[in-house]
Amino acid sequence: MGVTAQKFNQFTFFKLPAAWWTGVRVKSLNGDTCVVTVKHSWRNQNPFKSMFWAVQGMAAELSTGAMVINEIRKSKKKISMLVANNNANFSKKATGKITFTCNDGHLIKEAIDKTVATAEGQTFWMKSVGVNEQGVVVSTFNFEWTVKVKSSK
């Protein structure tokens, strides 16, 4: 059984407190898609009265990483995960409630199956798009994830 959005939000309180305190919350999570929201507030703003880019990055990364964690748990294998690279584009000031959506969950299982079969690390890119309440894209993030079976040393 996978992880629920509620359980993941409890996890962030203890393991990712910076994300939790800035308002980053998982709204929905399944095998293919993860939706994460964050609302602009005084806790996460920059001097220009919009959301700090790093807060957007935390929300975007969580929308990809939550699915990776979920798939690793379902595999019942000891697998490490790490962001190897990322890039971002900011197209509009982030104010109000920003919703980050990643629809790339289908890429994860194949990489995990391959690392289990070969014991070699695998990489894959996942994209998360952040939109404001009007549906306008404010930022797009890409994360290159690496997964590898943990050695039994």
Image (cartoon, rainbow, N blue to C red):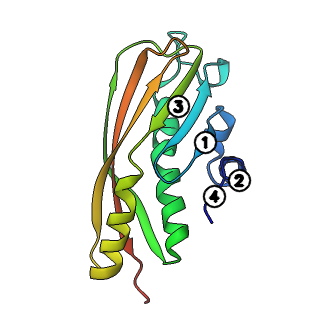
Left or right: 145 as drawn, with respect to 72: left
- Disc 4 from disc 1: Cα separation: 10 Å
Type of the residue with mark 1 = Ser
Q: Position of residue 42 (x, y in %)?
A: 66, 18
What residue does disc 2 label? 7
- Disc 2 from disc 1: Cα separation: 11 Å
Type of the residue with mark 2 = Lys
What secondary structure is marked by label 1? strand
- Disc 4 from disc 3: Cα separation: 23 Å
* Residue 81 image-quadrant placement: bottom left
Q: Position of residue 58 (x, y in %)?
A: 51, 38
User: Is residue 115 depicted above or below 4 in this figure?
Assistant: below
What residue does disc 4 label? 3
What residue does disc 3 label? 55
Identity of the residue drawn at 27% across and 76% down? 120
Left or right: 94 as drawn, with respect to 91: right
Q: Earlier in the sequence, mark 4 or mark 1?
A: 4
What residue does disc 1 label? 28
- Check the picture and name the quadrant holding the C terminus: bottom left
Identity of the residue drawn at 42% across and 42% down? 103
